[in-house]
Structures are given as structure tokens and as C-alpha cells.
Image (tube, grey):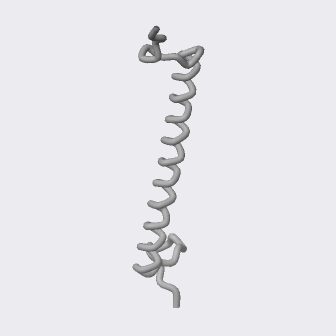
Amino acid sequence: MTRYQGAMTGTPEKPKAARARSEAEERERRLKAALRANLQRRKAQARARDDDDGDGAGPDMDDKE
């Protein structure tokens, strides 16, 4: 017989081990997505800084003669 979480929900209750595993997988998926978004943001910032520099020579790249 199938156990149900709520009275009329129709969704079977998951065992604790499976629920914990799926929560861990969901957390890992969220962390991966956040890391990907962070990496893309950092790359965009670096590209924007490079574009602002023009020739790539920053203030500490002065020609010393």
C-alpha cells in the first residue's frame, strides 16, 4: 500500500534517505548554477575593464625612459 503525504494530494511520501539525497542534489545544482553565474559576471567585468583601457596600458604601465 502506498503512503500519502497529504490527505488528497496524491503524492507518495519519499523515504528519508531519498529525500535527503534529492535535497543534496538540489543544493549542489543551485551551487553549480551560482558559480557559473558568478564566473560569467567576473568575465564580463574583466572584458569591460579591458575595453575601457583601450590599448591595455594602465596607469602603472607608464613608459620610463
Q: Position of residue 65 (x, y in %)?
A: 46, 8
- The residue depicted at 54 percent of the width and 35 percent of the height is 43
In the rendered image, the vertical position of residue 39 relative to residue 3, given as above or below: above
Q: Return the residue nearer the eye: 65 or 17.
A: 65
Q: Return the residue nearer the eye: 1 or 22.
A: 22
Q: Position of residue 25 (x, y in %)?
A: 49, 66
- 59 left or right, relative to 44: left
- The residue depicted at 47 percent of the width and 78 percent of the height is 18
Residue furthest to the top in view is 65
Residue furthest to the front in view is 65
Give the total of numbered labels. 0
- The residue depicted at 51 percent of the width and 78 percent of the height is 12
Q: Return the residue nearer the eye: 46 or 18.
A: 46
In the rendered image, the vertical position of residue 27 relative to residue 55, given as above or below: below
Q: Position of residue 4 (x, y in %)?
A: 47, 79
In the rendered image, the vertical position of residue 32 relative to residue 18, given as above or below: above
- The residue depicted at 52 percent of the width and 50 percent of the height is 33
Q: Position of residue 41 (x, y in %)?
A: 51, 35
Name the image quarter holding residue 20. Answer: bottom left
